[in-house]
Structures are given as C-alpha cells and as structure tokens.
Image: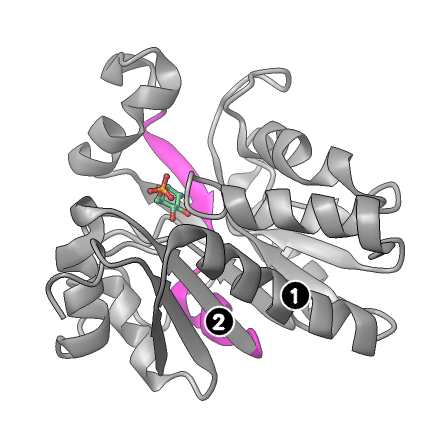
Amino acid sequence: MEVVIAPAERLAVLAADAIEAVVRSRPRAVLGLATGSSPLKVYDELARRHREDGLSFARVKAFMLDEYVGLPAEHPERYRNVIETEIASRVDFAEGAVQGPDGNAADLVAACAAYEESIAAAGGVDVQILGIGTDGHIAFNEPGSSLASRTRIKTLTAQTRVDNARFFGDDVDRVPRHCLTQGLATIMSARHLVLLATGRGKAEAVHQLVEGPVSALWPATIMQMHPHATVLVDDAAASRL
Ligand code: GLP
C-alpha cells in the first residue's frame, strides 16, 4: 500500500493522473466512481483536463460504488444524480456509459446480481476512486461487512446516517435507511484502488486503514491485501499515522 501525504489540491492531481493514464492507454478503460465530498476536487480536475487538454471519456465506461434505496428518480441526493452533476455531465461519456446499482428496482437482489454481471462484462474496473467513512467504511460496506462480500443490500449505520444528514437538510430522518453497495470483494477486484481522505475527522479511519489489523470491524483495512492500492491523505487525515 502506497501512502501519499500532501495538500488536498495535490492529492486531486495525483488521483486524476492515475485516471488519465488509464484513459489514455486503454481503448476501453473502466473507471470506478465514488460519491461523497472526498473525490470532488478529482472530478473538478478531470473536468478541467477534458476542457483544456482534450482528455476524452467517449470510450470509457464507469461504475458507481453504491446507491441509496428508494430515493425518487429526480432526488438530487440520489447518487446517480450526484455523479451526473459532479462529473458525468462535465465530460463526454457516451449515453449509458455510467452505471450504478438500481436502488429503485422492484427486485433489489436481482439488481445487485445484474450489477456484478455488468462490471464483469465490461472487463472489470481499472481504477477505482474511493472515499472512506469516519467509521472506516468504503462504499457502504459498514463495520461488520464480510470481507468476501459482493454487491448487495445493506442497512446504513446510525453513524453514517448522521454523517450524511448534511446532504439532507441536516435532518437525519430524511436519510434513507438502506442502500445497495458493491461488496468488499467487488471493490478488491479493481486493478488499482485510489482512496482519498482529508480532514481530522478521517484520522482514526486512516490510522486503522494503514496501520490496523485487517478486520471487518474497519472494512477499509481489506485494502492492505490489494496488490495496487494508493492512499492519498492530507496532513490532518494523516495525523494519527
Ligand atoms: C458515503 C459514501 C462513501 C464515501 C463516504 C465518505 O457514505 N457511500 O462512498 O466514501 O460517504 O464521504 P465523504 O467523502 O463525504 O467524507
């Protein structure tokens, strides 16, 4: 596991470099996109490179990590809409090239299986962008998640719902209770994992991720077993290393 400690702007450039390298070198690159605030500067940097340097995503596919269950199609916090706003609409992905688990499917179990098949059919993810929750979750794999898990339905922890209430008018009751999320084994199948974390609130999770024992209690620690994992953190997030 490679750990880089640098200011947030520099971290975004490094993550964008990893994505650009794969997009330019593989005719049909596959990206893994994360929601949350951590990747926002990366998406800004990719949009800038698209605008100014001609970086094209026209032949690129992208898969999202997770989705809330039951948010109306037009809800701004539905992750599909968040990704559209933050990155997809700012570059030149082809129609249908960005996919996410369908949190409104009539059969959620079947939707999870179909999502796994879509990722496999695309040839797997080349670079997966990740954030980390304060409790060490990645995607929505909350503490206690099986290290061998694939895409499935999960119940959000009280902590994550409180953390994410800021996106729902600071009203925790409006945060959905369930989600669909890629599993830890799904994420581990990506060829390169790039995790970003900034701020003191992430310091304990980053400490566990890098220095703690591999454990389902801190799901991100599974990344220690990955052959190509990059952890990009600022000084505050690295303060417990
Ligand atoms: C959510 C997302 C995760 C994300 C985490 C951290 O729970 N499902 O993918 O990593 O929040 O969010 P942030 O980057 O805003 O701190």
Disc 2: which residue:
193
Which residues, given as a range, are shown in magenta?
Answer: 176-191
Residue 69 or residue 22, whichever sits in front: 22
Residue 9 in the image, given as x and y percentages of width and height: 47, 52
Is residue 115 shown left or right of residue 221?
A: right
Give the residue at x 34% y 85%.
225
The answer for how far apart the CA atoms under marks 1 and 2 are is 11 Å
Neighbour class for label 2 at 10 Å: few (<14), some, many (≥20)?
many
**Amino acid type for the residue under numbered disc 1:** Ile
* Above or below: residue 71 compared with residue 183: above
Instruction: Looking at the image, tell me whether mark 1 or mark 2 is earlier in sequence order.
Output: 1
Residue 167 in the image, given as x and y percentages of width and height: 38, 21
Classify the position of ligand 1 by quadrant: top left, top right, bottom left or bottom right.
top left
Residue 70 in the image, given as x and y percentages of width and height: 49, 24
Which quarter of the rendered picture does the C terminus lie within?
bottom left
Numbered label attached to residue 19 = 1
| Residue 187 lies in the magenta-colored region | yes
- At mark 2, the secondary structure is strand
Q: CB atoms at circles 1 and 2 under 8 Å apart? A: no
* Above or below: residue 162 compared with residue 240: above
Give the residue at x 43% y 39%.
36
Q: Quadrant of residue 175?
A: top left
| Residue 60, visible in the rendered structure | yes
